[in-house]
Amino acid sequence: MKKLIWVGDSTVAFNGEGTFPQTGIGQEFDRYLKREYVVMDFAKNGASSKSFYDAGRFEPARRIMEKGDFLFIQFGHNDEKPKPDRHTDPYTTFQEYLMRYVDAAREKGAVPVLITPLSRRLFREDGTIQNSHGEYPGAVKALAEREKIAVIDLTEKSRMLYEKTGDQASRKWFMYFPAGMYEHYPKDMTDNTHLHYEGAVRMGGLVAEGLMELGGIYAELLA
């Protein structure tokens, strides 16, 4: 079996029963792939490109990576945070850490794909989405262009989708629901970052759309 390996943060991470219905994109992405691919999701809640690598969380993914596999790399949400163990600067340390993943994939004969961070669902009064990721998405795209790496602009794709759908209708994709609807959430949830099951499937569709746009070996992943 060929492998599609995810590294990243909570927006792509695998969730268990204890956090249901929170769901990461990687957790549901196999529905878009050909049957010969298996998804291996190593993403971690709260991880930045730096903390994930420095804590050794990439090593299990590196060990299983083989020629012909794909490595999907999606960080940015937590690189923005000021904590020293997580923070990176967009055009220096962030790009340097991203290249560690890219280089590891290339050394193994795997194919790296950079993915810009999922937009937060933060609406302005005029119905547009705030840019809550600063320069990080641009840094991912600049690195991809410089180093000839495939990139999917999930930041922009998700922003456009939210704006087209609107504030009320887009809530269903996020952890946004009243108290008591789910066993582990006794309080109202108004989380505009983490995805509901339905949101993970929908945002996975945007990633699949990006693969189709890349064409070639990337489009060939898709069912």
Image (cartoon, rainbow, N blue to C red):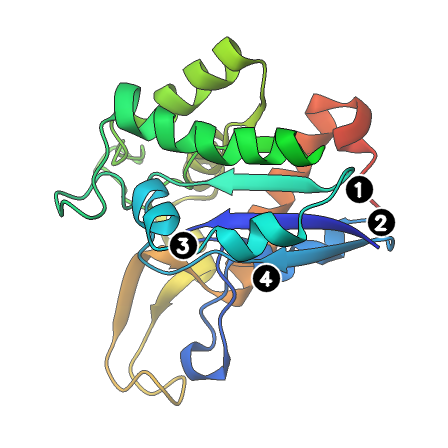
Query: In front here: 128 or 89?
Result: 89
Position of residue 37 measured from the top left corner of the image (x, y, whole percent): 80, 52
Asked if residue 76 is positioned above or below residue 44 in the image, the reply reads above
Q: How far apart are the alpha carbons under marks 3 and 1?
A: 30 Å
Q: State which tag comes first along the sequence, 1 or 2.
A: 2
Instruction: Classify mark 1: helix, strand or loop.
Output: loop
Based on the displayed image, in which of its 4 quarters is residue 194 positioned?
Answer: bottom left
Q: State which tag comes first along the sequence, 2 or 3.
A: 2
**Residue flagged by tag 1: what amino acid is it?**
Leu
Q: Are marks 4 and 3 in contact (CB under 8 Å)?
A: no
**Residue flagged by tag 3: what amino acid is it?**
Gly
Rendered image: mark on residue 27 = 4
Residue under label 3, please give it.
56
Instruction: Classify mark 2: helix, strand or loop.
Output: loop
Residue under label 2, please give it.
34
Q: How far apart are the alpha carbons under marks 4 and 3?
A: 21 Å
Query: In front here: 67 or 121?
Result: 67
Q: How far apart are the alpha carbons under marks 4 and 1?
A: 16 Å
**Residue flagged by tag 4: what amino acid is it?**
Gln
Asked if residue 66 is positioned above or below residue 184 in the image, the reply reads above
Q: Say which residue appears at 41% left-offset and 84% top-offset.
A: 182
Q: Residue furthest top?
A: 146
Q: Say which residue appears at 42% left-offset and 24% top-offset.
A: 140
